[in-house]
């Protein structure tokens, strides 16, 4: 041996070059973000929408509230910026991929149109170079070309009409199955409808996205709780398969005494009640723990025309995963809406007793 370190050689396999597209790799459904950003730049908005819609039946929704892991992985955000003398200043910013997706969805003109028009456009779309084989347009073309045998309409039960259940129903319907979704709530879309306020995600947009999926042959049965209104054994008996997509709709607790007492609501439970118009026993003075809940932007209390007075408490988790009080340097301030804003040290317990009007 001459003392040189061995050289590691990797022969590019199938998919090697696609894995270099960091934004698409980071996307949970592997949307070709590069493709629709290029189409937008060229003014081809319809093509941009069809690329974004290919692997994602909820593209218009994701253009508004997606966590955008593609932007965190965007290589543009790692490009160094230098001054006139060539000295490093900072790293550049990632492309605003999520905002561009929303722009494409709005500019293409499909939102709100009849579902059959949308499906017809997708059927005639040509999948992009980096599209996956299971994308909608690719599946439709492969079925017509006889490259795979569609199912014969076998029923598949899906428990939960949230994003996962809707996406499963969408893809199963494309493959020739007859998906039936059992949803315990009276509205579909799960946390999209019950956890995201309407000012962030319009309800008409949710209903439109769901209607496109239903037009493929999926059906949704509302008010059906498995184990109460129908047994799991019945689902297994009457359906070819069962998909469990119930989600994890629980509020985070603090582990404080009294947090399950009357007048104390978890954020998820409170948002659900507000979204469904259910009455809440909310007092005149309201304490919000853990930042600014979207619900507090609504001003008046549910069931009352009087505005509530809010006091904010910030709460963080320590390295040992224990709740630890935290206070910012901004102190307290009054806002024009009459709400108290700022951060205080929370107590180590929540006192018992009903809320006061």
Image (cartoon, rainbow, N blue to C red):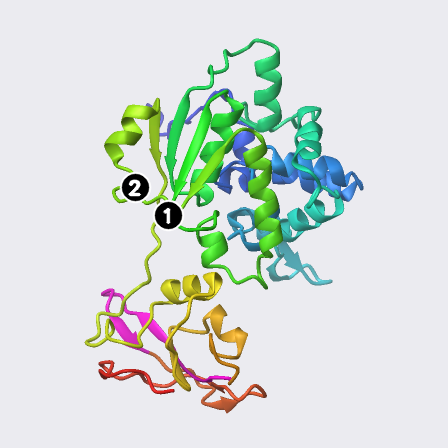
Comparing 76 with 349, the one in front is 349
The residue singled out by tag 2 in the image is 226
Comparing 138 with 308, the one in front is 308
Report which quarter residue 117 is drawn in. top right
Comparing 337 with 21, the one in front is 337
Q: Position of residue 77 (x, y in %)?
A: 59, 53
Q: Position of residue 69 (x, y in %)?
A: 51, 49
The relative height of residue 280 versus residue 37 in the rendered view (above or below) is below
Left or right, 298 with reference to 344: right
Which residue lies most toward the front here?
229
Q: Residue at x 41, y 24 (%)?
A: 155
The residue carrying pointer 2 sits among few (fewer than 14), some (14 to 19) or many (20 or more) residues within 10 Å by Cα, namely: some
The relative height of residue 45 versus residue 135 in the rendered view (above or below) is below
Q: Which residues are magenta?
A: 307-325
Answer whether residue 318 is magenta in the image: yes
The relative height of residue 105 versus residue 173 in the rendered view (above or below) is below
Q: Residue at x 38, y 27 (%)?
A: 6
Give how far apart the Cα atoms at labels 2 and 1 are. Answer: 8 Å
The residue singled out by tag 1 in the image is 184
Contact, mark 2 vs mark 1 (Cβ under 8 Å): yes
Residue 304 shows in this picture? yes
């Amino acid at each position: 041996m001459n003392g040189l370190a061995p050289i590691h050689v990797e022969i590019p396999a199938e998919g090697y070059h696609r894995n270099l597209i960091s934004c698409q790799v980071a996307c949970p459904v592997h949307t070709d973000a590069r493709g629709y950003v290029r189409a937008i730049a060229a003014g081809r908005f319809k093509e941009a929408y069809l690329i974004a819609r290919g692997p994602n039946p909820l593209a218009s929704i994701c253009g508004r509230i997606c966590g955008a892991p593609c932007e965190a992985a965007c290589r543009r955000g790692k490009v160094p910026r230098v001054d006139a003398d060539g000295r490093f200043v900072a790293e550049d910013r990632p492309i605003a991929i999520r905002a561009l997706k929303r722009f494409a969805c709005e500019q293409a003109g499909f939102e709100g149109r009849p579902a059959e028009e949308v499906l017809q456009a997708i059927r005639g779309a040509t999948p992009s170079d980096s599209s996956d084989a299971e994308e909608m347009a690719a599946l439709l073309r492969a079925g017509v070309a006889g490259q795979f045998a569609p199912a014969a309409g076998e029923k598949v039960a899906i428990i939960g009409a949230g994003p996962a259940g809707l996406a499963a129903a969408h893809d199963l319907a494309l493959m020739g199955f007859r998906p039936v979704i059992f949803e315990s709530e009276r509205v579909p879309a799960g946390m999209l409808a019950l956890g995201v306020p309407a000012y962030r995600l319009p309800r008409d947009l949710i209903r439109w996205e769901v209607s496109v999926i239903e037009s493929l042959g999926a059906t949704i049965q509302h008010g059906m709780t498995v184990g109460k209104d129908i047994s799991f054994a019945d689902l297994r008996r009457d359906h070819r398969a069962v998909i469990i997509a119930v989600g994890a709709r629980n509020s985070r607790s603090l582990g404080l005494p009294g947090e399950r007492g009357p007048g104390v609501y978890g954020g998820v439970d409170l948002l659900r009640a507000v979204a469904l118009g259910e009455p809440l026993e909310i007092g005149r003075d309201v304490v919000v723990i853990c930042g600014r809940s979207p619900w507090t932007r609504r001003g008046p209390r549910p069931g009352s025309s009087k505005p509530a007075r809010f006091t904010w408490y910030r709460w963080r988790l320590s390295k040992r995963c224990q709740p630890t009080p935290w206070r910012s340097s901004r102190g307290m301030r009054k806002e024009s809406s009459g709400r108290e804003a700022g951060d205080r040290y929370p107590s180590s317990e929540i006192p018992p007793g009903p809320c006061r009007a």
